Amino acid sequence: MNMNHHVEVVENQVLQLTAYDMPELGADEVLVEVYYSGLCGSDVPRVFDKGAHFYPITLGHEFSGKVVAVGQDVEKYTQGDSVCCAPLVPCQECDVCEQGLYSLCKHYSFVGSRRQGGNAHYVAIPQKCCFKLPNTVSLVEGAFFEPITVGLHPIVMAGGCKDKHVVIIGAGTIGLLTLQVAKALGAASVTTIDICDDKLETARQLGSDRTVNSLDSEQMAEFSELSSSTKNQMIIELAGVPETFMLSLNIAGPRASIYLVGTIHKDFNIAYKDYEKVLRKELSIVGSWMNYSYPYPGEEWDIACQLFSEGKINTKVLLDGIYEPDMYITRVSQLPTQPMSGKILLSWGQEDE
């Protein structure tokens, strides 16, 4: 165990399998043998659009594995524990951290972005970033904890979604996880909106009560009429484009709550008639940033663990594939012309017992 291999972004658009010495373990750190590491949509611009904080960088913030060593101050974890990573490293000293609002920390670090991440055979992470997995949760499922908690965060902020009519805009991996969460937590109904019929078919397979292709004017007109009078409505916007923000305002029923999760990366204007919809419908618009709360990493992670343990989350239909390093590099390099059809997982070839 003297060498540690990483799938590294050496420079913009260049991925390489690189060997390093094993990381030195800090007193408060845990050494994890990584089994599975997921590619997040936020990683794509870090690979292709000069979006990384530095180069070379080892990405990976959605990963799971087993503890192989612990620092001298680590008490919660022992060799052999199965864990996943909660990648935010809050300072726990700023004013918002003192309020337990860890997602809003002003001086945070982040595994796989601001420090080296889990696209490595072995990675050292702070013990607070480890979340212990019970034997009822597989390590493949553990690699989905970070994305599923992104969808859980607005639901936790809302005090749950029981008996609410939930509308999910954007049927990517997080959207398809969130619809399963909403069903499992007792939503009165779940509607999934996207522009891709294949994704909407997957949403139906996963239990979405209604699916709507927003490019289909007939489907949209029918749903908008129904939605405009729906009470107790919770809209979760995950696509992160101006059009879906406007769509949220258009379909919202009276006093609906709109939770904005998707990140919009360009400026846009809003017409006063659209702004007026917020007033006339008395809408609540809430921002949702990351996926952490008090006590760290938060209730989101405990709920995720419970739902996976109870077999209520299907990840098999959400996989693009599980790839060992060379094939992973090939698959990721194809993304500009062959987009992800689900979650891309990096594996180092171990058996998930």
Image (spheres, rainbow, N blue to C red):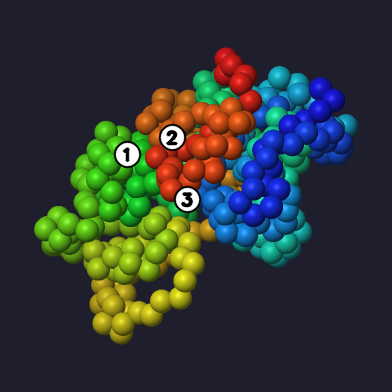
Picture disc at residue 336: 3
- Answer few, some or many: residues within 10 Å of disc 2's Cα (few below 14, many 20 plus, some between 14 and 19): some
Q: Is residue 182 visible?
A: no
Q: Tell me where residue 65 sits by quadrant.
A: top right
| Left or right: where 303 falls relative to 272 | right
Relative vertical location of residue 192 with respect to residue 272 in this rendering, above or below: above
First in residue order: circle 1 vs circle 2 = 1
Judge from the rendering whether residue 331 lies leftward or rightward of residue 222; answer left or right.
Answer: right
- Amino acid at the residue labelled 1: Lys
Q: Does residue 70 appear left or right of residue 240 in this picture? A: right
Screen quadrant of the N terminus: top right
Which numbered disc covers residue 320?
Answer: 2
Q: CA distance from mark 1 to mark 2?
A: 24 Å
Identify the residue at horizontal 17%, vertical 57% (top origin).
Answer: 216
**Residue 79 versus residue 324: which sits nearer the camera?**
324
Q: As drawn, is 194 to the left or to the right of 116?
A: left
Other residues around mark 3 within 10 Å, as few (<14) / some (14–19) / many (≥20): few
* Residue 55 showing in the rendered view: yes
Asked if the residues shown at circle 3 and circle 1 are in contact, with their CB atoms under 8 angstroms apart, the answer is no
Helix, strand, or loop for circle 2? Answer: strand
Position of residue 76 measured from the top left corner of the image (x, y, whole percent): 74, 30
- Callout 3 secondary element: loop
User: Which-is-in-front pick, marks 3 and 1?
Assistant: 3
Q: Position of residue 317 (x, y in %)?
A: 37, 31
- What is the spatial separation of the Cα atoms under label 2 and label 3, in whole angstroms? 15 Å
- Report the residue marked by disc 1: 183
Of callouts 2 and 3, the N-terminal one? 2
- Badge 1: residue crowd in 10 Å (few <14, some 14–19, many ≥20): many
Mark 3 vs mark 1, CA separation in Å: 34 Å
